[in-house]
Image: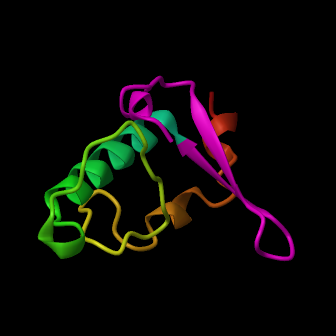
Amino acid sequence: MHSKHEAISADRLFYAFVDFEPTVPVVYTIPSRRVAEVVRASHQAWLALPGRGGVPHKDSKMRRLLPAYNFPVAEATPGWMEQYREAWELVRRL
């Protein structure tokens, strides 16, 4: 993702992330507000960690949205995406 996704948030905007690894693909339907929150928080948490050899990470425009991070992100504890697995009812409510 891109740094601009930290600020893209609208009530009627959702992202559909598709996991093609299972035999039957799985779709995670996530509200843009939640994506922005997790992308922002995970990037800040990553920047706060030392990189290889203790060298600080360099900021960039690239962002990652993951189902689980290998460092603590309060806004995205392991399994955080499961509530959005095939959550088409979120879109139908609109």
Q: Residue at x 26, y 43 (%)?
A: 59
Q: Picture coordinates of residue 80 (x, y %)?
A: 43, 64
Left or right of 79, for residue 57: left
Q: Picture coordinates of residue 94 (x, y %)?
A: 62, 27
Q: Is residue 45 above or below residue 10?
A: below
| Residue situated furthest right in the rendering | 23
Q: Magenta stretch: residue 86 in it?
A: no
Q: Residue at x 40, y 73 (%)?
A: 78
**In terms of image quadrants, where is residue 26?**
bottom right
Give the residues in magenta. Answer: 1-30
Q: Magenta stretch: residue 3 in it?
A: yes
Front one among 83 and 4: 4
Left or right of 31, for residue 25: right
**In terms of image quadrants, where is residue 60?**
top left
Q: Picture coordinates of residue 40 (x, y %)?
A: 31, 43
Q: Picture coordinates of residue 28 (x, y %)?
A: 64, 55
Front one among 25 and 94: 25
Q: How is the image coloured?
A: rainbow
Left or right of 60, for residue 45: left
Q: Residue at x 36, y 49 (%)?
A: 38
Front one among 92 and 61: 61
Report the number of numbered marks: 0
Q: Is residue 2 above or below residue 68?
A: above
Q: Is residue 60 above or below residue 51?
A: above
